[in-house]
Image (cartoon, helix red, strand yellow):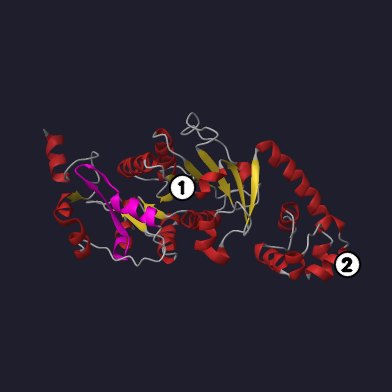
């Protein structure tokens, strides 16, 4: 076995990445004995870890940096979750398999990572309608004791986090930067308690935000979730890639269907055609029964076959299907159609 401190030190060593460290950890030496890098000579590191001399020479300095970080982690209440060890989210490992992050840095109630969860993805520049849909759905999930997971970005992410907390639920913030960059935003500042949230990052603690990290972060959200909700997606960008990741990982994907999609929701129709499930209203309120069912059953391997006027859905719900309706957009939340809205405006 190799200690968390030493894994952190290897990650801090230039020239070693997660794949190289995983290879080192998989060697028989680390499987069958306890290893302390601080007790090993440079020669031993080269021989036993099969690393280049220039890398081995850096490791003592990296150990000192790791020790300093661990002291800071203790002050900040940050924990390290190692892939394959106790505390690492089983769902994430099961879903992403070899692509699951080697380490997770977490602060807050890490027990939330074992609970039923739904991931939310959507545009940073979502329409008011999209934000309202995200809030309504997240609040309803929170009332069902389902963890709401999102990426802590402005727009849909923050709307979902805030709505879940306001409804008395719990939420998980998945960062696209190092956890030491985490700052409490005003949207949720007065809602956080020691129990109701956890902050997670797979990146080195001081790494700044990067666009490519946001893409990977969204895949991690999918891996942590029993199902994924796309509120508004363009035809490219992070949300679009997150939706594609959910489909490829066989996570049940639910996408809001709008009567008149805003520009920020142009990609929604693409996912509905690819087999995503409709996120609709019933009698003016969010209809989430299928989503609740998917979460409860954790339908990882269930083939998704959904579409407009789907025959199987009609047989299951009968006349109830006729009561379902799409989200009207743009216009006032809950309006019936744009023509009627225009008429009301003129009057």
The residue at 74%/51% (across/down) is: 5
Q: Is residue 173 left or right of residue 118?
A: right
Q: Residue 17: give x, y in percent of width and height.
A: 68, 62
The CA distance from mark 2 to mark 1 is 45 Å
Label 2, secondary structure: give it.
helix
Label 1, secondary structure: give it.
strand
Q: Is residue 330 left or right of residue 140?
A: left
**Residue that badge 2 annotates:** 43
Q: Which mark is residue 174?
A: none
> 99 or 269: which is nearer to us?
99
**Residue that badge 1 annotates:** 150
Query: Does the magenta portion include 278?
Result: yes
Residue at the extreme top of the image, as rendered: 190
Q: Residue 262: give x, y in percent of width and height.
A: 29, 50
Q: How many marks?
A: 2
Within the image, what quadrant is residue 339 found in?
A: top left
The residue at 82%/63% (across/down) is: 56
Query: Does the magenta portion include 56?
Result: no
Query: In this rendering, does residue 62 appear at all?
Result: yes
Q: Residue 31: give x, y in percent of width and height.
A: 72, 65
Q: Over which residues does the magenta segment extend?
A: 272-297
Q: Is residue 186 left or right of residue 24?
A: left
């Amino acid at each position: 076995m190799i200690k968390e401190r030493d894994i952190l030190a290897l990650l801090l060593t230039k020239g070693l990445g997660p794949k190289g460290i995983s290879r080192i950890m998989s060697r028989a030496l680390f499987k069958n004995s306890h290893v302390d890098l601080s007790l090993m000579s440079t020669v031993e590191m080269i021989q036993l870890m099969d690393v280049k001399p220039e890398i081995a020479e850096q490791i003592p300095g990296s150990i000192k940096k790791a020790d300093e970080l661990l002291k800071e982690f203790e002050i900040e209440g940050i924990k390290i979750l190692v892939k394959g060890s106790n505390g690492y989210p089983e769902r994430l490992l099961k879903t992403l398999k070899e692509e699951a992050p080697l380490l997770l840095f977490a602060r807050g109630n890490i027990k939330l990572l074992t609970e039923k969860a739904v991931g939310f993805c959507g545009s940073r520049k979502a329409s008011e309608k999209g934000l309202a849909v995200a809030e309504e759905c997240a609040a309803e999930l929170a009332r069902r004791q389902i963890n709401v997971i999102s990426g802590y970005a402005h727009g849909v992410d923050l709307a979902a986090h805030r709505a879940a907390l306001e409804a008395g639920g719990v939420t998980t913030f998945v960062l696209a930067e190092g956890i030491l960059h985490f700052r409490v935003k005003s949207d949720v500042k007065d809602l956080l308690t020691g129990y109701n949230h956890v902050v997670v990052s797979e990146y080195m603690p001081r790494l700044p935000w990067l666009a490519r990290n946001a893409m990977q972060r969204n895949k991690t959200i999918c891996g942590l979730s029993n199902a994924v909700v796309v509120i508004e997606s363009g035809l490219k960008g992070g949300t679009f890639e997150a939706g594609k990741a959910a489909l490829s990982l066989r996570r049940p994907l639910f996408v809001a269907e709008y009567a008149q999609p805003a520009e920020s929701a142009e990609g929604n129709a693409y996912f509905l055609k690819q087999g995503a499930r409709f996120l609709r209203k019933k009698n003016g309120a969010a209809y989430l029964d299928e989503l609740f069912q998917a979460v409860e059953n954790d339908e990882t391997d269930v083939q998704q076959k959904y579409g407009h006027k789907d025959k199987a859905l009609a047989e299951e719900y009968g006349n109830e299907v006729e009561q379902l309706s799409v989200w009207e957009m743009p216009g006032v939340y809950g309006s019936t159609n744009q023509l009627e809205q225009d008429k009301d405006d003129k009057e």
